[in-house]
Image (cartoon, rainbow, N blue to C red):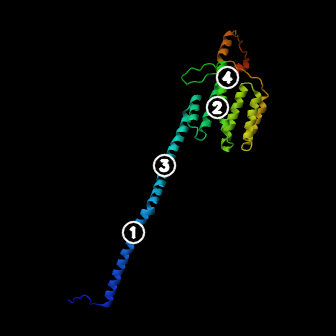
């Protein structure tokens, strides 16, 4: 078998080997230069970019965590609003979740409506297991003042936006009802007119209804006091028993209602 001695051989093969070695050497130099450039970049600017990326990543995770916490907080607010039963509970919800949408306004409106309903029924508020008592004049006045204050707080939050229009109208209508309960027809008419102006552009029919209520206030300026259940029971005991005469029924009516059995 023939062997090739160094320095001898085909010139084409030797040239190819030299070119291949040159390419490998050039590739090694290029990779080395790239690695050195990367090391230099890390030493000069790399740490700054890595720190900025780390800050952005931490900010993103913090935003996700805050969004999750905010969602749970809002859900808790609406759940507590639905589970509240007494005016004090609604007021507590309004204070605790004052930054959750319409929750504080709705809570105050519900509390005021319960107080106003208690005045209309003449019974004190309390748990379902507690016996309701008749409202005294002082308690009635306190309930009305407290309800009017709650409605007033809702009106003060009005920012003129469309999303609050119905809430403000509800509060103004409640204040008008309280003014009527106190015998102040002029103030009640003023509140009804304010409610009409608030929704004139959005709900014209609702505005017309508020104006009709304002006009109706002047038709009944005198307060009507309804007797309590105790007063009705006392009147029944004092009244004499009434003897009712038997009802006379014509024979033909009796035959029609109670037909005779056929033989």
Nearer the observer: mark 1 or 4; the answer is 1
Specify the label residue 150 is tagged with: 2
- Relative image position of residue 197 (x, y in whole percent): 75, 39
- Mark 1 crowdedness (10 Å alpha carbons): few <14, some 14-19, many ≥20: few
Circle 3 — which element?
helix
Q: Is residue 86 visible?
A: no
Q: Position of residue 239 (x, y in %)?
A: 70, 10
Residue with the mark numbered 1: 36
User: Is residue 249 or residue 11 the one in the foreground?
Assistant: 11
Q: CA distance from mark 2 to mark 3?
A: 37 Å
Quadrant of image for the C terminus: top right
The answer for how far apart the CA atoms under marks 1 and 4 are is 86 Å
Q: Which mark is residue 141?
A: 4
The residue at the point 66 percent across, 43 percent down is: 163
User: In this view, which residue lies farthest toward the left?
Assistant: 1
* Mark 1 or mark 2: whose residue is earlier in sequence: 1
Percent from the top left, x then y, of residue 261? 64, 20
Where, quadrant-wise, is the N terminus in this rendering?
bottom left
Q: Can you tell which mark lies on residue 53?
A: none
User: What is the residue that sits farthest to the front in this orientation?
Assistant: 44
Residue matched to label 3: 62
């Amino acid at each position: 078998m023939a062997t090739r001695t160094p320095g001898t051989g085909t010139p084409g093969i030797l040239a190819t080997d030299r070119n291949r070695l040159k390419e490998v050497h050039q590739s090694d130099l290029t990779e080395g230069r790239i690695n050195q450039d990367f090391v230099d970049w890390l030493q000069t600017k790399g740490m700054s970019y890595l720190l900025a990326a780390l800050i952005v990543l931490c900010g993103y995770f913090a935003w996700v965590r805050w969004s999750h916490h905010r969602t749970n907080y809002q859900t808790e607010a609406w759940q507590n609003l639905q589970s509240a039963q007494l005016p004090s509970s609604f007021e507590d919800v309004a204070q605790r979740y004052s930054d959750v949408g319409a929750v504080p306004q709705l809570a105050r409106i519900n509390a005021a409506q319960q107080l106003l309903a208690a005045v209309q029924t003449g019974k004190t508020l309390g748990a379902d297991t507690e016996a309701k008592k008749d409202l005294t004049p002082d308690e009635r006045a306190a309930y009305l003042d407290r309800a009017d204050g709650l409605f007033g707080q809702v009106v003060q939050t009005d920012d003129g936006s469309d999303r609050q229009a119905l809430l403000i109208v509800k509060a103004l209508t409640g204040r008008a009802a309280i003014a009527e309960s106190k015998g102040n027809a002029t103030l009640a008419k003023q509140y009804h007119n304010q409610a009409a102006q608030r929704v004139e552009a959005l709900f014209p029919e609702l505005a017309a209804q508020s104006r009709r209520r304002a006009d109706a206030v002047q038709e009944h300026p005198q307060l009507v006091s309804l007797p309590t259940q105790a007063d009705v029971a006392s009147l029944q005991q004092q009244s004499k028993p009434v003897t009712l005469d038997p009802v006379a029924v014509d024979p033909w009516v009796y035959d029609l209602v109670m037909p005779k059995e056929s033989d």
